[in-house]
Amino acid sequence: MATEPAELAIRLQRAAFNRALAAGDLDAIAPLLDRNAVLVTGTDSAVITGRKAQLAAWRREFAAADATVYSRLPTVIEASPIEPIALEHGKWTGVSKSGRPVASGTYVAKWRLTDGHWIIEAEIYLTLA
């Protein structure tokens, strides 16, 4: 498996995820997550397991009066040359819809190529500011 096409495909998927978060579009987020995807939050290390649980968490976030819009910026994507998996390292930010910075930090995400599409299996966030 060539790593360059994987890196480009994952960067495109991450950009789609960021657009979906900014738009509050649950229908666009759902296909980017594995059915059993795991998310470990940055501040309190809450574990959100499964696509349905993550979509419910995003639904609550989108409904907030001054919802936080999260964005991830990949810095490194490393694809396995022997398995259909990759690891993304990057920086994340959370800014309220009113423009107030809320939090930021670093993250890692594990991706898997499934049925020709890269989907997120796991994400871990670290809050730094």
Image (spheres, rainbow, N blue to C red):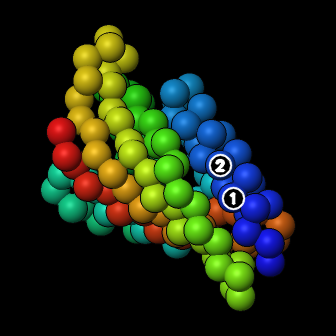
Whether residue 111 is visible here, answered yes or no, is: yes
Whether residue 65 is visible here, answered yes or no, is: no
For the C terminus, give its image quadrant. Answer: top left
Q: Identify the amino acid type marked 1.
A: Glu
Q: Residue at x 71, y 88 (%)?
A: 82
- Residue 1: percent from left, percent from top: 80, 78
The part of the image, by quadrant, that contains residue 47 is bottom left
Q: Residues within 10 Å of mark 2 (few under 14, many from 20)?
A: some
Identify the residue position indicated by label 1 in the image: 7
The circle drawn on residue 11 is 2
Q: Residue at x 39, y 45 (%)?
A: 91
Q: Residues within 10 Å of mark 1 (few under 14, many from 20)?
A: many
Q: Identify the amino acid type marked 2.
A: Arg
Q: Is residue 116 left or right of residue 16?
A: right
Q: Is residue 7 left or right of residue 2?
A: left
Q: Is residue 122 left or right of residue 6?
A: left
**Dots 1, 2 in contact, CB < 8 A:** yes
Q: Residue at x 28, y 39 (%)?
A: 104
The circle drawn on residue 90 is none
Secondary structure beneath disc 1? helix
Number of disc labels: 2
Q: CA distance from mark 1 to mark 2?
A: 6 Å
- Residue 22: percent from left, percent from top: 51, 27
Q: Residue at x 69, y 58 (%)?
A: 7
